[in-house]
Each structure stands twice: as structure tokens, then as C-alpha cells.
Image: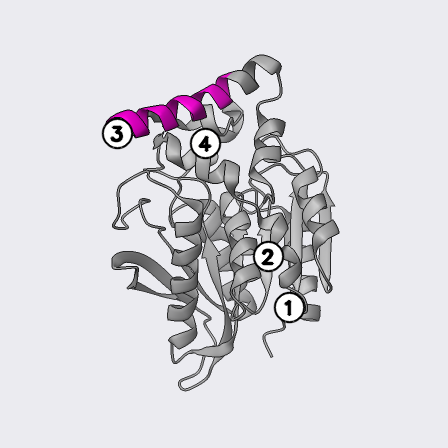
């Protein structure tokens, strides 16, 4: 079993805990490329969407690090207060920490994220050049359009947008946040909810939903080129509309690859899907090899 090390680093004065995974064949004094692995919406580093890709990448020879964003898991910050641009700052700090490790090639550290973490990975790489490669699984590029695809009926859309309006009103008038259940922000079918990590956030301030609504990785994805980008998405995704990755692909420069798979759903890495792993392995060998 690969060696693991519990670590912590700071992001804007907040302490964020993480776990680094080292390949079994890593020799003393040797440096390897690395990946920072980001968790999904209100999740944490104990999710299978973090653990599975970390283990997989480490088996291939990469040093990997999973961590808790502020307000999630065991990280400092107000629990459940998830603001997209703050998660971008946390990702920069995580990347800088991993790149500083003696076991890691400083100039070869990528980012991999699932769902919300995928959107944050793409956005961060679009505004932060040190990220060397990006893997996005079930991500999104336009918050408003994503939410329209998740709240599909007229009634559901009115309910969602009215919540945003009420949240802004309450914040302005009282200084307090309107708290909103997880599935009122991002609907997830019941049969997929078992994929959520333990201690995942269940209630969020409406400011979280507003920050997601305003978040637009579409605007910066073109800046990633010429660094490699891999977009993975289920061809029929029960959580995040597939068109989100297709639109990111349209706006991205080269080299960018898009793969839509028909035999999986939103939690692509938690599923231990063989085809997804084959696609990722081939892409890494071509675009971001260990050696």
C-alpha cells in the first residue's frame, strides 16, 4: 500500500488539512510529477471521488494530495460557507504547497477535480499558470446555465431564483444568511446520494448558491492552453448537464481532449469505471507522463 502523510497548509490565514500519497517505488531523493485532487460540492478529502483518483494516480507513479477546502471537512472557516473564488484561492495554496515538497517536480504539478472541484480546477488553471495540467470530471463552466439545466421546470426555476433574491434581501436587511438545504441548490437523485462523503455539508448559506451562479470557468478555460486539459463527462449525467463540458471544450485551446462515456454517471471515479481509467491512463501517457 502506498505511503500516506497527513499534512496541513494555510490559505489566507486558514489552516487546511490534507493527505499526500506517495508511490511505492519513489526512491530517496527522487522527484515525481504531482496532482492536487479537489473534492466536490460541500464534500471533503474523505470522499471516494478524492480517494479513488489519488490511489489510481499514485499507482501510476504520481505524488498526489487531497485536502479539505475551507468550510469543509476538518478545515478552518465557517462550516458550509462555500464561495467559489475562495476555493480558487485554496486550490492555488494547495498547489503551491505540493509543488514545494522535496518529492515533487515543482514545475509539473497538475489539478484534478470532480463536479464542483472540476469547475474550480478549470477556473484556477485559467487564472494561475503554475498548474501544469488539468483533469475535469463532470465539471461545469457557466453557473447560471448549469443551474437552469438542474432546475428544469418553470416552477423549479422560480423557486431557485426566488431563493437567491430572498437570500440577498435577508443579508442586506439583517446581516444574516438564509440557510438552504443542499438538494435545493444542487439536486441529486436519491440513488446517487450514497456517493457523498461522511460529514458532507447539508445546509449552505444562500451566498454559496449565488457564488456558483456567478462562477464562469467558460470565461478563462481558453487561458489553459498550451497546458493539457482533459474533460471527462457522463454522456447522460444525472447531476451536472453534459453540455457543460462540451461548451468548455468549444472554448478551450489545444491540447484539449473531451470524452463522454455512456456506461457511468456523475461520480465517475467513485464508480471505479474501467473505461474512465483507461482514458485517463492513455491521456497521461501522452500529455503528462510520469517520466
For marks 2 and 4, give the one nearer the viewer: 2
Dividing the picture into quadrants, the one containing residue 123 is bottom right
Q: Is residue 159 left or right of residue 268?
A: left
Q: Nearer the viewer, mark 3 or mark 1?
A: 3
**Mark 2 = which residue?**
135
- Residue 227: assigned label: 1
Q: Is residue 250 above or below residue 254?
A: above
Tell me how far mark 3 sits from mark 1, CA to CA. 42 Å
Residue 128: percent from left, percent from top: 51, 65
Observer-nearest residue: 111 or 53?
111
Name the outermost residue toward the front: 173
Q: Position of residue 240 (x, y in %)?
A: 59, 35
Q: Residues within 10 Å of mark 3 (few under 14, many from 20)?
A: few
Q: Crowding near pointer 4: few (<14 within 10 Å), some, many (20+)?
A: few
Marks 3 and 1: CB-CB under 8 Å? no
Which disc number belongs to residue 194?
A: 4
Cβ–Cβ below 8 Å for labels 1 and 4? no
Amino acid at each position: 500500500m502506498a505511503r500516506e502523510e497527513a499534512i496541513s497548509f494555510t490559505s489566507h490565514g486558514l489552516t487546511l488539512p490534507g493527505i499526500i500519497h506517495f508511490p511505492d517505488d519513489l526512491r530517496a531523493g527522487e522527484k515525481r510529477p504531482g496532482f492536487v485532487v479537489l473534492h466536490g460540492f460541500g464534500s471533503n478529502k474523505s470522499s471516494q471521488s478524492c480517494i479513488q483518483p489519488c490511489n489510481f494516480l499514485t499507482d501510476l507513479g504520481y505524488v498526489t494530495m487531497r485536502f479539505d477546502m475551507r468550510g469543509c471537512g476538518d478545515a478552518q472557516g465557517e462550516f458550509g460557507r462555500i464561495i467559489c473564488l475562495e476555493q480558487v484561492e485554496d486550490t492555488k495554496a494547495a498547489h503551491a504547497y505540493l509543488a514545494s515538497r522535496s518529492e515533487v517536480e515543482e514545475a509539473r504539478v497538475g489539478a484534478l477535480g470532480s463536479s464542483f472541484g472540476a469547475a474550480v480546477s478549470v477556473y484556477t488553471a485559467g487564472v494561475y499558470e503554475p498548474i501544469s495540467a488539468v483533469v475535469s470530471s463532470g465539471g461545469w463552466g457557466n453557473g447560471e446555465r448549469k443551474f437552469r439545466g438542474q432546475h428544469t421546470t418553470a416552477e423549479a426555476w422560480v423557486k431557485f431564483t426566488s431563493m437567491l433574491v430572498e437570500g440577498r434581501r435577508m443579508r442586506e436587511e439583517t446581516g444574516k444568511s438564509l440557510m438552504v438545504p443542499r438538494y435545493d441548490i444542487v439536486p441529486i437523485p436519491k440513488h446517487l446520494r450514497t456517493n457523498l462523503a461522511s460529514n458532507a455539508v447539508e445546509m449552505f448559506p444562500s451566498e454559496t448558491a449565488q457564488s456558483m451562479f456567478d462562477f464562469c470557468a467558460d470565461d478563462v478555460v481558453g487561458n489553459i492552453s498550451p497546458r493539457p486539459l482533459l474533460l471527462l463527462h457522463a454522456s447522460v449525467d444525472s447531476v451536472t448537464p453534459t453540455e457543460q463540458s462540451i461548451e468548455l471544450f468549444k472554448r478551450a485551446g489545444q491540447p484539449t481532449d473531451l470524452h463522454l462515456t455512456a456506461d457511468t454517471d456523475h461520480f465517475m471515479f467513485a464508480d471505479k469505471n474501467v473505461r474512465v481509467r483507461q482514458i485517463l491512463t492513455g491521456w497521461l501517457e501522452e500529455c503528462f507522463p510520469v517520466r
